[in-house]
Image (cartoon, rainbow, N blue to C red):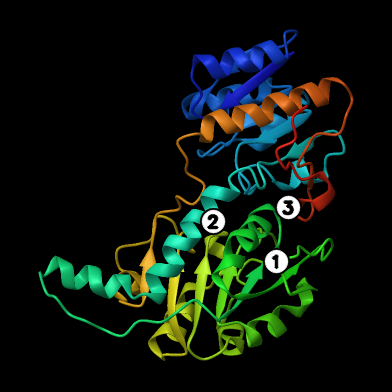
Amino acid sequence: MRIVLCYPVGKKHIDQIQAAAPDFEVVNAGQERIDELLPTADIFIGHAKVPVNWDRVLQAGKLRWIQSSAAGLDHCLVPGVIESDEIVVSSASGLFAPQVAEQTFSLLFGVIRRAPLFFRAEAKREFVRLPTDDLRGKTVGIVGLGGNGRFLARVLAPWDVRIIATDFYPVDCPAEVSELWPADQLDRLLGESDVVILTLPLNGDTKGVFDAERFATMKRGSYLINVARGSVVQEQALCEALASGHLAGAGLDVTEVEPLPPESLLWDDPKVMISPHVGAQSARRVDDSTALAVINLRRYQSGLPVYNRVDKRLGFPHPSSVYRGQAD
């Protein structure tokens, strides 16, 4: 029985995993050997960022559980994995919600307080005063109220904003959220929001969902913050909404194509603030990923349901299974 790892672990992390699963051989494949070693895995923990021959993995017939070290699952939710009744998939959904919230705030305040313009002036040593906007008193719409969205609502609430949200599972509305609607009420949310924050998963239903028609539905002068997945937004439509002045600004931690091509119009737009998909980065990322993997390993071996078990056809876990810092 073998556990194959593919995330930047150190010796202490490997030792933690080995201690939690003494009957397994633990192999650190890294990105360099993951394609070679994944077919030998009974359990896969990590995130392959290089191409993997999933047909070969499925033909080997060994794999029974994938514990992703990321919330996004497009790296492993290939058709064969989705269709397999034998392969359980769990994610890191919500594990890095504090970091995602911090990145959201950096982008949100950056575009509202016009930081890109001031950065450009600073680079030219120009002391130019320009009007800015305010967050206080605005309606903030959160699209996707999973682990990240719920934490974000909690830390946004003290800023004297009205928070509304949509989610595929509109259940257990947090006290900080004024209204929680089903996902099919997205246009209603867009029409009421001064700031729209995307924390929804990427799947067949959400890919490209923010197109020209959706941007036209947003309030004129509103802001878009995307800390979800780049492919939920059509870049050309976003550029047009910004150029027309319909959107006042956009903060993007993710883009439709990554890395963002040098010729993209987004780079030069002074109403846009860009970070290179670092929302979930943390000095504790590997430690926290390993801690969740160890908790889930113990549950898996005991026959208990793992935290963050994913509905493979939807691409995200039901709220009832999301890991919220439980100590097992």
Q: Name the front one of labels 2 and 1.
A: 1
The dot on residue 253 is none
Q: Is residue 232 visible?
A: no
Residue at numbered disc 1: 176
Query: Which type of secondary structure does the marked residue at label 1 adopt?
Result: loop
Question: Answer yes or no: do the residues labelled 2 and 1 have beta carbons within 8 Å?
Answer: no
Of residues 88 and 278, the one nearer the viewer is 278
Q: Residue at x 35, y 77 (%)?
A: 271
Q: Is residue 302 left or right of residue 155?
A: right
Of the residues shown, which amino acid type is indicated by label 1?
A: Glu
User: Residue 133's spot in the image, x, y percent?
Assistant: 40, 82
User: Residue 262's spot in the image, x, y percent?
Assistant: 30, 63
Query: Which type of secondary structure does the marked residue at label 3 adopt?
Result: loop
Q: Is residue 162 left or right of residue 11?
A: right
Question: Answer yes or no: do the residues labelled 3 and 2 have beta carbons within 8 Å?
Answer: no
| Image-quadrant location for residue 188 | bottom right
| Image-quadrant location for residue 288 | top right
Query: Upstream in the sequence, badge 3 or badge 1?
Result: 1
Q: Quadrant of the C terminus?
A: top right
Q: CA distance from mark 3 to mark 1?
A: 26 Å
Residue at numbered disc 3: 315
Q: CA distance from mark 2 to mark 1?
A: 15 Å
The 10 Å Cα crowd at callout 1, few under 14, some 14 to 19, many 20 or more, is some
Of the residues shown, which amino acid type is indicated by label 3?
A: Gly
Of residues 62 and 237, the one nearer the viewer is 237
